[in-house]
Image (cartoon, rainbow, N blue to C red):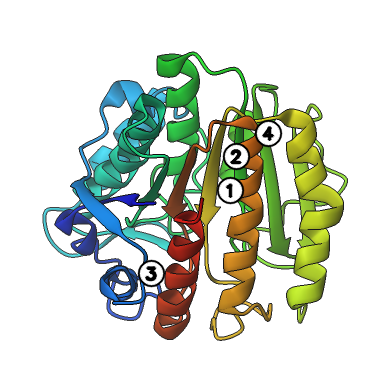
Amino acid sequence: MHVAVFTHPACLLHEPGPAHPESPSRLRAVLDALDDEQCAATRRFEAPLASEELLARVHRLHMIQSVHDAAPKQGTAYLDPDTAMSAGSLEAALRAAGAACAAVDMVMQGDFQRAFCAVRPPGHHATSDQAMGFCLFNNVAIAAAHALAAHGLERVAIVDFDVHHGNGTADIFRADARVLYASTHQMPLYPGSGAASDHGEGNLVHAPLPPGAGSAPFRAAFNDHILPALERFAPQLMIISAGFDAHRLDPLANLNLEAEDFAWVTRQLVAVANRHGNTRVVSSLEGGYSLNALREATLAHINALAEP
């Protein structure tokens, strides 16, 4: 099975600063993995620019305008101590959000069953009114809202296995029963949210993991909490926040997953999609700050996405 890959050279032009972990080299590592002879068949498509209409389904207009206004013509502008913009950042962020929506359109039209967005900046920390945590716009949230509005879906699942809790995604949809948000993440760790007791309106499933946790607790969190919730929800579309910073090599966190764990979880999510969502899966890159881990985990993820 071919996997549609949405990307754009503009996503390499987002430069948060020479010492910033969210560097262009991350995307180069991902693209290297996609070019690996061991990678499943992919077909690349150019990520379009997201329109204001798409962004405004999840972000307030003043927030969208503030990101536009902050974009510098040269140098670096900081939205918060962790979140920076360069001259190329605005286009990169618009392409990242546009990629996720274009991927939704493609799988909904049946042209491809699986799609991966090789983009940056990541998105899952961006809330309805604040860019934060390396994130400018919330790519997966924008994609989910687009699936609901443009394709008439009634049940969209977002599964986030980034090592950091996707506070922005959870906050955007916590009162919207049409979207199930499920997350494994290290706790304690930035941004400090995602407690197991936080269920939203019954549509949030949080399975935090302690520092040092590896394969067994990670898989148990899915088997015991997330996969049963997904089966009950029966999503018509599966969206994945594919962060690979829970890998044991990642410098910003302390979980101990291997590439095979990302392959395993991807297979579980594909299986749910096969049962309930006409095999439709859209995945979008979030975190991951070890280049070797990014290559390994991306290769494992794409190969699992390509399985029937």
- Amino acid type for the residue under numbered disc 2: Ala
Q: Nearer the viewer, residue 20 or 182?
A: 182
Residue 246, position as x, y percentages in the image: 61, 72
> Which badge, 3 or 4, comes first in the chain's sequence?
3
**Image quarter of residue 134:** bottom left
For numbered disc 3, what is the local secondary structure? Answer: loop
- Residue 186 image label: none
The residue under the point 35% across, 56% down is: 121
Height in image: 17 above or below 9? below
In this view, the mark in front (3 or 4): 4
Q: Which mark is residue 273?
A: 2
Q: Residue furthest left?
A: 73
Q: Given contact means CB atoms under 8 Å apart, are the residues at marks 1 and 2 in contact?
A: yes
The residue indicated by pointer 3 is: 22
Mark 1, secondary structure of its residue:
helix
Q: Is residue 163 visible?
A: no
- Residue position for label 1: 270
Q: Nearer the viewer, mark 3 or mark 2?
A: 2
Residue drawn where x is 54% and y is 31% of the image: 278
Q: In the image, what residue type sits under mark 3? A: Glu
Mark 1 residue type: Val
Under mark 4, the amino acid is: Leu
Residue 174 drawn at (x, y percent): 69, 30
Q: Is residue 112 left or right of residue 57?
A: left
Q: CA distance from mark 3 to mark 4?
A: 28 Å
Q: Earlier in the sequence, mark 3 or mark 2?
A: 3
Q: Earlier in the sequence, mark 2 or mark 4?
A: 4
The tag earlier along the polypeptide, 1 or 4, is 4
Q: CA distance from mark 1 to mark 3?
A: 28 Å
